[in-house]
Image (cartoon, rainbow, N blue to C red):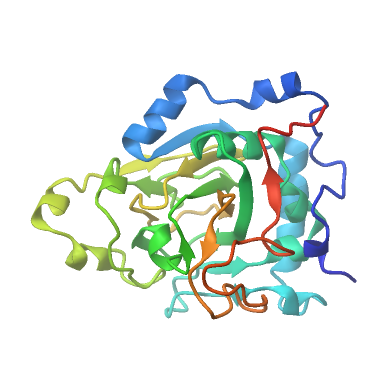
Amino acid sequence: MKDLADFHHPITDLFLQPRSANDWNRFKLSQDQIDFFHENGYVAGIKLLDENQIEALKKALDEVMDPDHPLHGLFHEFHSNESADPNTVLFHSLGHWRIAEAFHDAIWNPAFRMVASQLLGDRAVRFWHDQLFCKPAHHGGVVAWHQDYSYWTRTIEMQHLTCWCGLDDATEENGCLQYVPRSHRWGLLEKPALAGEMDGLMAMLSEQQKAEFKPVSVPLKAGHGAFHHPLLVHGSFANFSDKSRKAFVLNVFADGTISNSDEPLLEGVPVISKGEKMGGKFFPLIFDPNKLEG
């Protein structure tokens, strides 16, 4: 039994790695997609996984969700239900890349890494942390409207990115992502309870922001992902359908991001002193566009 955070490279054959700089080109976004991201704060419908990879990750998810898993202590956070209501369940965890080989290697998925670098301005990319979000059929809870960076100000400067990838088809019926286009231009807002009242953020908005608050649904097929800006307001509604909605999230930042805290940045992670560059065992460099394989 080992902590997979010790391995800063793929450890399985689940994700075939490019052998040359040219091989990476097939994973690149178009300029139109990049422009859409900068205008709206997100880009969606990016194919990240094939059927074999989806099944491997779903199997791993079922295993790590067990609170009696022998490596359970490696999670940074584990919430069988982050909601306070037992009738609206939201499973949420951080740190499963340390436990399951499939989730560890998902960080080194070339389709994910190339896009992350492009959207961060063609910069080198470091891993921040992962998340699992699972909404069971019939009683899956909400993820309230929020901005990711409002929970991440312990790292600066703001040069972060989130990738959300479904392991089930995500639909309006089972609680797919909802984005508020162009809200990444609103600046940093106060943070609500993540699994609290869906509209808790509204009390923190100006009248103009409320007028511009026009969410769009982002349904996604399993294996497809969406990338969004750290200030984009987003959330997801409850799942009262007869189908589950399982997803994982990979959060990254541009190389050169520094710690803004003298407290542990994640539970169980050694302190990186305020002002020191993020790196080491838990925040590996996962992509450098100037050092492509091949």
Residue sitting at x 90%, y 71%: 1
The spot of residue 222 in percent (x, y) is 60, 40
The picture places residue 207, in percent across and down from the top left corner, at 9, 56
Q: Where is residue 84 in the image (x, y as percent from the top left)?
A: 43, 80
Specify whether residue 85 is in view: yes
Q: Residue at x 73, y 67 (%)?
A: 64
Does 219 sit above or below residue 255? above
In depth, the one of 74 and 225 nearer the eye is 74
Of residues 134 and 207, which is closer to you in this image?
Answer: 207
What residue is rendered at 74% in x and 79% in y?
A: 73
Label total for image = 0
Residue 140 visible to an observer of this rendering: no
| Quadrant in which the C terminus is drawn | top right
237 vs 162, nearest the viewer: 162
- Residue 255 x, y percent position in the rendering: 59, 50
Which residue sits furthest front?
275
Please identify the quarter of the rendering in which residue 153 is found.
Answer: bottom left
Looking at the image, residue 128 sits to the left or right of residue 56; the answer is left
Where residue 49 sits, quadrant-wise, is top right
Q: Residue at x 38, y 55 (%)?
A: 235
